[in-house]
Image (cartoon, rainbow, N blue to C red):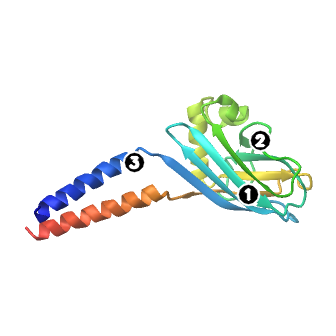
Amino acid sequence: MSKSSWQSCFLAAALSLTSSLASATIYTYAADLGPEAAGATGTGIVKLKFDDSTNDLSIYAGFAGLSGTTTVAHIHCCTALAGGGTVGVAVTPGTLPGFPAGVSAGSYSAVIDLDLASSFTAAFLNNFGGGTLAGARSALFAGLDAGTAYFNIHTTQFPGGEIRAFPERVPEPASLLLAAMGMGALLLTRRGRRGI
């Protein structure tokens, strides 16, 4: 196989893999949870994964050392200031489904179907989402990307919220692979042109 044939095959394979990976649209956001109120002692982590082909939001949180015991947890959006301020609840009225109450340490994992109106508060759906599910999803992820959405845990000691985090987007391994393959293909085509 000639050098140019090998380069063409590699480029075709890279483009094929790129197109199949590009259709996998999972967005990941993560952050460390820290005190939301003066005197709060809790810490933890939160990770959100959104699949825009299914509109499912996966949530994982681990927490420990809370000053009080848990009452509710929420995702709020969208503050006026990135990384600060407070705003009403966006995702799930009341509390996140199945969130453990009455503990000072633990973990939480759930999948929220963002194709359901019940997954958003009415205020968020109407005020930020323009009354539509598509609008609410767009507003939520615009808030996450802008740093104006946060996850928090409320406790008996701090009913307004003990710990919280403004999750930031994390590059997916597939995105990094796509970038590396694109650079590799570009280098091969440039190298091939020099040899002509």
Q: Which residue is mark 1?
A: 62
Q: Going from the N terminus, do you reach mark 1 or mark 3 first?
A: 3
Q: Which residue is mark 2?
A: 98
Q: What's the distance in space between the residues labelled 1 and 3, CA to CA?
A: 30 Å
Q: Quadrant of the N terminus?
A: bottom left
**Residue 194, image x and y in percent?**
12, 70
The residue at the point 41 percent across, 44 percent down is 23
| Residue closest to the eye, 73 or 61 | 61
Q: What's the distance in space between the residues labelled 3 and 2, CA to CA?
A: 33 Å
The residue at the point 36 percent across, 63 percent down is 180
Query: Looking at the image, can residue 63 be seen?
Result: yes
**Residue 24, image x and y in percent?**
44, 45
- Mark 2 falls on what kind of element? loop
Q: Which residue is mark 3?
A: 22
Mark 3 residue type:
Ala
The residue at the point 87 percent across, 53 percent down is 103
Residue 8: quadrant of the picture: bottom left
**Residue 134, image x and y in percent?**
56, 33
The residue at the point 78 percent across, 41 percent down is 95
